[in-house]
Image: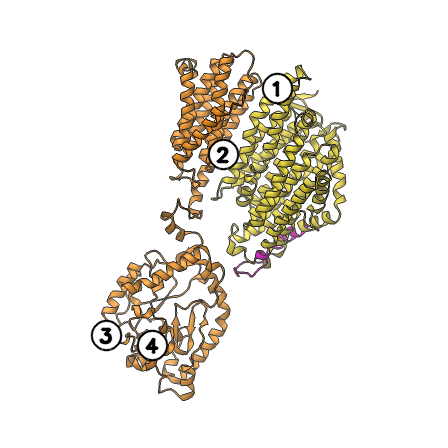
Chain colours: A orange, B yellow
């Protein structure tokens, strides 16, 4: 190894020192882990050659130091190789900025004559001392620049090791018999091990970090914001958090592959807000509102029991099959009778008015519960399934499921979706009802939050899955939630164009 | 001096440093093997470190050697251990530092029995404890003992990375930045030691004195990590387990205070040749002010805690700049209250973190309704770091501010305003913690956890009402340091 240093004596010359300084600068400029690790070894080799040139240091000490730095770089490289490609989150600026910083520092060093002199033993010649001073100051500045520009364990580790290079040479020169150089070597290994550990943990944490939208990340990272931890995929939510999504039988069949009974679908409560190209995600804030709305569940249940009683009076034969939840899904209710719920006309807010749905306009087989298909009357076989699963609902899947649905509908049902027929003017309470019940049904009621946070128009047995929660929290109005809501709104508008 | 010689290993005498270091390393090895049985390892470590703390505090170095009948050995309290150019001895000045370090570790272990801080916490902490004990017992080394300390601190900070990160997939900024001050300063101390050796040959050389003073002053100030080198404290408090944060922060700062005391004692010309007082005052004011401002805007409870600790640390840095032995008494008093406040806050914060799943804001909202005692412990501990009335830190801040105001009232006013910022931050945090509960699935706090929080609050309140309880221990510690 001693002959190795003598064969690379070039590093101790003026050109060699400039080259080593250039390598240190290139480490900053390139900002690549391979360049940094290789550059670190080169700088250490150059520093060892310069130190040996003084004749005051034993070659073995420098050989050991080069080996230690090589070992440190190996430790860091192994960690980098172990970690999945993990570009650091913290931006270090582009190469132009780094180049400008190097130029600025170099110019400042040239212009500012601070007469700084490092301590050297008297045995060292003045020319050697001057070269070493310039060299070590530049290396130290490069280490500080790397520290300032970096927040990643790799580059911080490289910077700290770079800082240790001149420190080791000085300790060896100034305190030759103290054994401090051995301690510095141990400390360097500890630093490398610690940083390599942090490299591995950093690569794990990248997925969990919220990405701040800046001009650097915009717009590519904008979509990733939707995968921020504040957005919880349905599949990951617990049962309490899952809003119930009414879905048609076809849609479910298309997604799950489970063959359902081939009865004619009686309608759909598909909500356009659920149609997305990406897995449906639900804002935590909305989930929190859902839970807050549970407080109104008791009132909702009370009203439902009243409706149960009313419907039992109307159709005693059907009351035996009544189900608390089925009351909100009664086949033949206007919205269910309307098969084109997915039709853009649904976006008309007047549809949310229960009075617009005229039971008399509906198909008599649907309007009459006694003549309804038993499988529809049976909540367990109803094609309007309540989906709790976290299977991703994609726009593509649901669109494919919707198409045959609308195609297979009778023309009369399609006609019912025309705005004229669903206008409030044509809506009237069912004439067959007793007067007091008819009045009660006609009376508009306030949407009551149910267990899942959606509002229920109890008088018509109608679920308004699009109804807004009654109370908006501040959290929902800010940040990602606002973005998410805007996205939802966009999704709602999309079907209009189709 | 009765130093340990490896050739006389069969000698019946065992020096106390060997017993402490060897015992801690052996315990670290055993606990690492059984690290998955966390409650067992923490309990054993708590018992041993607690016993060591009590024994060391009451140790009389002039007493006769202690006979260990089981091992058939005799422990020589004043015996020294010399290896690799380092000489270790339990001298009177080291005893308070050793006992305090052991006591802090014991408390941390007790708290860890209930809430895990990572499987490797116990063994790594024991190794760190051995390292800090080594620093305290270091009499001489390859260079002067205080001047080699920063290099050893680099090694200890590197080991501390593992338990600060604790295998968490979180940002690594805090552990990483905790390395930087020690790494940056150790070359300055080594160069200063070379000049100090030359100074011994010509003790009245003013140029050498200036250089040594300059290097050591810069080194000390960087090691204290004032603004803008402060980021490690807040980052660590945000991401690291709270009990680990508390323990490592206090161990490091205790070692640092001991180092400064030793440097100022060994090189008394420093304050005369370099405006050390001015530098420390400026650094302290900046740190305290920034800590207050940042705390006022912090929303993360860990970060808020970190900034409150930074504010308190700024006041302590300021007091270090005031020469005289009286001010060391105030410094130790403030540090003791700081330790109590940080401990109380860590008790509460660790329980809150455990329940709120790494401080998820949704889980944090209203958590005080389910965990009233732990939330109160966090708030009271944090307010103690700001010197809020009726908290543990109030008397320390009051005395410190009075001392600072006696020199310059404007600085004291700045610190007061900064304290208000910390208080605002904690009031906002209290509104969050005791606000409407969102996560109704949160369970009520564990009775044992509530009891620990209550004990922490009780100690804080006791010291707030009767700060003279600390007078005795601080005076004896100061007396031991001055020997």
Task: Tell which of B19 and A208 is nearer to you.
Answer: A208
- What secondary structure is found at the residue carrying circle 2? helix
Residue nearer the viewer, A191 or A20:
A20
Q: Give the label on residue A410, or none.
A: 3
Nearest the viewer among A139 and A252 is A139
Image location (x, y in percent) of residue A309: 43, 81
Q: Which mark is residue A334?
A: 4
- Span highlighted in magenta in the image: B431-455
Instruction: Chain letter for mark 1, please.
Output: B
For label 1, the SS is: helix
Q: CA distance from mark 4 to mark 2?
A: 67 Å
Question: Mark 2 packing: few (<14 Cα in 10 Å), some, or many (20+)?
Answer: many
Circles 1 and 2 on the same subunit? no
Q: Residue at x 67, y 51 (%)?
A: B457
Q: Are marks 4 and 2 in contact (CB under 8 Å)?
A: no
Residue at the disc numbered 2: A194
């Amino acid at each position: 190894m001693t002959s190795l240093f003598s064969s690379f004596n070039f590093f101790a010359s003026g050109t060699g020192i400039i080259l080593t300084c250039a390598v240190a600068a290139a480490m900053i400029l390139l900002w690549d882990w391979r360049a940094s690790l290789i550059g670190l070894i080169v700088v250490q080799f150059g520093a060892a050659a310069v130190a040996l040139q003084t004749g005051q240091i034993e070659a073995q000490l420098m050989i050991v130091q080069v080996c230690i730095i090589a070992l440190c770089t190996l430790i860091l490289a192994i960690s980098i190789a172990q970690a999945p490609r993990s570009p650091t989150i913290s931006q270090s600026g582009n190469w132009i900025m780094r180049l400008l910083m190097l130029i600025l520092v170099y110019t400042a060093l040239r212009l500012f004559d601070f007469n700084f002199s490092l301590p050297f033993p008297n045995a060292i010649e003045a020319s050697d001392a001057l070269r070493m001073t310039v060299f070590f100051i530049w290396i130290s500045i490069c280490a500080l620049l790397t520290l300032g520009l970096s927040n990643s364990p790799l580059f911080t580790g490289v910077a700290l090791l770079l800082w240790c290079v001149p420190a080791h040479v000085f300790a060896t020169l100034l305190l030759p018999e103290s054994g401090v150089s051995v301690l510095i070597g141990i400390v360097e290994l500890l630093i490398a091990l610690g940083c390599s550990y942090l490299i591995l943990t950093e690569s794990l944490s990248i997925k969990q970090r919220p990405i701040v939208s800046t001009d650097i990340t915009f717009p590519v990272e904008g979509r990733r914001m939707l995968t921020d931890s504040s957005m919880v995929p349905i599949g990951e939510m617990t049962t309490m958090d899952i809003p119930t999504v009414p879905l048609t039988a076809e849609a479910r069949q298309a997604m799950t592959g489970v063959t359902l009974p081939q009865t004619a679908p009686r309608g759909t409560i598909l909500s356009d807000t659920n149609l997305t190209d990406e897995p449906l995600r639900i804002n935590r804030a909305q989930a929190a509102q859902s839970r807050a709305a549970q407080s109104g569940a008791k009132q909702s249940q009370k009203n439902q029991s009243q409706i149960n009683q009313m419907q039992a009076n109307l159709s005693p034969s059907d009351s035996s099959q009544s189900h608390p939840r089925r009351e909100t899904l009664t086949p033949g209710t206007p919205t269910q009778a309307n098969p084109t719920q997915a039709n853009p006309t649904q976006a008309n807010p007047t549809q949310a008015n229960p009075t617009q749905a005229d039971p008399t306009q509906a198909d008599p087989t649907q309007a009459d519960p006694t003549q309804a298909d038993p499988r529809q009357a049976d909540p367990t076989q109803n094609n309007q399934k309540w989906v709790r699963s976290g299977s991703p609902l994609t726009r593509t899947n649901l669109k494919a499921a919707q198409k045959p649905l609308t195609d297979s509908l009778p023309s009369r049902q399609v006609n019912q979706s025309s705005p004229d027929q669903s206008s409030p003017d044509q809506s009237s309470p069912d004439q067959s009802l007793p007067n007091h019940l008819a009045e009660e049904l006609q009376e508009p009621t306030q949407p009551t939050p149910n267990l899942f946070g959606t509002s229920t128009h109890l008088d018509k047995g109608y679920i308004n899955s699009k109804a807004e929660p009654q109370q908006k929290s501040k959290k929902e109005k800010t940040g990602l939630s606002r973005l998410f809501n805007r996205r939802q709104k966009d999704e709602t508008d999309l079907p209009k164009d189709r | 001096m009765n130093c340990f010689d490896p050739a006389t290993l069969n000698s019946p005498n065992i020096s106390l440093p060997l017993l402490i270091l060897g015992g801690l390393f052996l315990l670290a090895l055993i606990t690492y093997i059984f690290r998955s049985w966390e409650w067992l390892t923490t309990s054993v470590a708590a018992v041993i470190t607690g016993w060591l703390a009590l024994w060391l505090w009451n140790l009389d170095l002039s007493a006769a050697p202690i006979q260990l009948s089981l091992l058939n050995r005799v422990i020589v309290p004043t015996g020294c251990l010399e290896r690799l150019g380092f000489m270790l001895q339990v001298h009177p000045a080291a005893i308070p530092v050793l006992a305090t370090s052991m006591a802090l570790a014991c408390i941390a272990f007790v708290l860890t029995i209930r809430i895990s801080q990572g499987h490797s916490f116990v063994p790594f902490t024991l190794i760190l404890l051995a390292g800090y004990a080594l620093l305290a017992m270091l009499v001489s080394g390859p260079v002067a003992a205080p001047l080699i300390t920063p290099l050893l601190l680099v090694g200890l900070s590197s080991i501390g990375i593992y338990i600060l990160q604790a295998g968490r997939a979180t940002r690594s900024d805090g552990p990483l930045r905790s390395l930087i001050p020690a790494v940056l300063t150790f070359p300055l101390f080594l160069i200063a030691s070379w000049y100090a050796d030359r100074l011994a040959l010509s003790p009245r050389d003013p140029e050498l004195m200036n250089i040594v003073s300059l290097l050591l002053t810069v080194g000390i100030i960087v090691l204290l990590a004032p603004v803008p080198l402060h980021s490690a404290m807040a980052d660590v408090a945000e991401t690291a387990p709270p009990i680990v944060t508390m323990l490592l922060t206090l161990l490091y700062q205790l070692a640092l205070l001991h180092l400064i005391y030793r440097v100022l004692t060994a090189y008394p010309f420093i304050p005369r040749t370099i405006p050390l007082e001015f530098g420390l005052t400026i650094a302290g004011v900046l740190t305290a002010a920034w800590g207050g401002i940042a705390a006022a805007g912090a929303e993360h409870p860990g970060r808020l805690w970190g900034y409150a600790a930074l504010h308190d640390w700024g006041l302590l840095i300021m007091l270090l700049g005031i020469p005289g032995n009286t001010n060391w008494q105030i410094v130790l008093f403030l540090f003791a209250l700081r330790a109590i406040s940080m401990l109380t806050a860590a008790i509460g914060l660790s329980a809150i973190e455990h329940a709120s799943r790494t401080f998820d804001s949704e889980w944090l909202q209203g958590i005080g309704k389910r965990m009233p005692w732990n939330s109160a412990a966090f708030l009271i501990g944090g307010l103690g770091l700001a010197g809020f009335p009726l908290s543990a830190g109030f008397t320390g801040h009051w005395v410190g501010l009075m001392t600072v105001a006696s020199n310059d009232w404007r600085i004291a006013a700045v610190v007061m305003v900064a304290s208000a910022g910390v208080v605002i931050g904690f009031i906002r945090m209290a509104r969050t913690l005791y606000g409407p509960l969102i996560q109704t699935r949160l369970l009520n706090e564990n009775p044992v956890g509530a009891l620990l929080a209550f004990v922490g609050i009780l100690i804080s309140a006791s010291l707030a009402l009767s700060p003279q309880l600390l007078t005795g221990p601080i005076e004896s510690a100061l007396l031991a340091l001055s020997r």
